[in-house]
Amino acid sequence: MKKSDFERMIDRTFGSLEANYKFKRLETTFRRNGATVRYENATTGLVLSYEIGDEPWLTMVDLNNTKRKSTLGWLLVEQGVAKSPTPKEAFQQKTLGPESIEPFLQKMSSQLQEHGAEILKGDFSIFPKLQGRAQKYAVECKRYADIHKMKP
């Protein structure tokens, strides 16, 4: 995929953040195997990470305390929209073909605005729960890796 095609896709799928929540796209960084897109408004930072062939993921950050951050995935688990991944799944690659990227990004944008509106407005009160889930999962994944002699 060309860089310009990827940027247009990002504009189509995440452009509503600019209109609805006053986000600005700060930069798009391209690497050989993927891209990172950064957005910010007055309170919230968003980092969309994409590795070719994998599912993109979105990190949300409190700009006033950058240690307070989490992902859209953990938000969806906390709100009962998605189920918690198993440690085994952490070591399995999820593949996403080129034709599926834009629909996947559109779904992420919709889920973010539907389930993360408070975060987009600067209310990070849910972050301790999300970070707790992530920490517990990291411990479970390390245990799984140790048992199966895998590299995390």
Image (cartoon, rainbow, N blue to C red):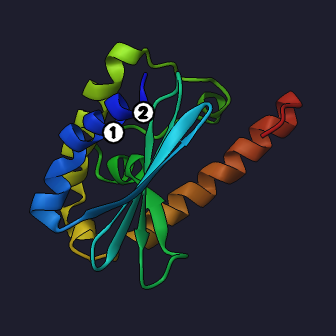
Would you say 114 lies left or right of 88 here? Answer: left
Disc 1 residue type (three-letter)? Glu
> What residue appears at the point 28 percent right and 79 percent down from the top-left corner?
42
Q: Position of residue 46 (x, y in %)?
A: 38, 60
Whether 1 is drawn above or below 35: the answer is: above
* Residue 7 marker: 1
View extreme (right): residue:
149
**Does the image show residue 114?**
no
Whether 148 is drawn above or below 83: the answer is: above
Whether 119 is drawn above or below 74: the answer is: below
- Packing grade of label 1 (10 A; few <14, some 14-19, many >=20) is some
- Packing grade of label 2 (10 A; few <14, some 14-19, many >=20) is few
> What residue appears at the point 48 percent right and 83 percent down from the top-left corner?
65
Would you say 88 lies left or right of 21 here? Answer: right
Front residue of 64/81: it is 64
Q: Position of residue 13 (x, y in %)?
A: 22, 39
Quadrant of the drawing holding the C terminus: top right
> What residue appears at the point 23 percent right and 35 percent down from the top-left corner?
106
Would you say 96 lies left or right of 138 here? Answer: left
Marks 1 & 2, CB-CB < 8 Å contact: yes
* Residue 3 marker: 2
View extreme (left): residue:
20
Whether 128 is drawn above or below 84: the answer is: below
Which element is circle 1 on?
helix
Which element is circle 2 on?
helix
Q: Position of residue 150 (x, y in %)?
A: 84, 31
**Does the image show residue 147?**
yes
Residue 39 lies in quadrant: bottom left
CA separation, marks 1 and 2?
6 Å
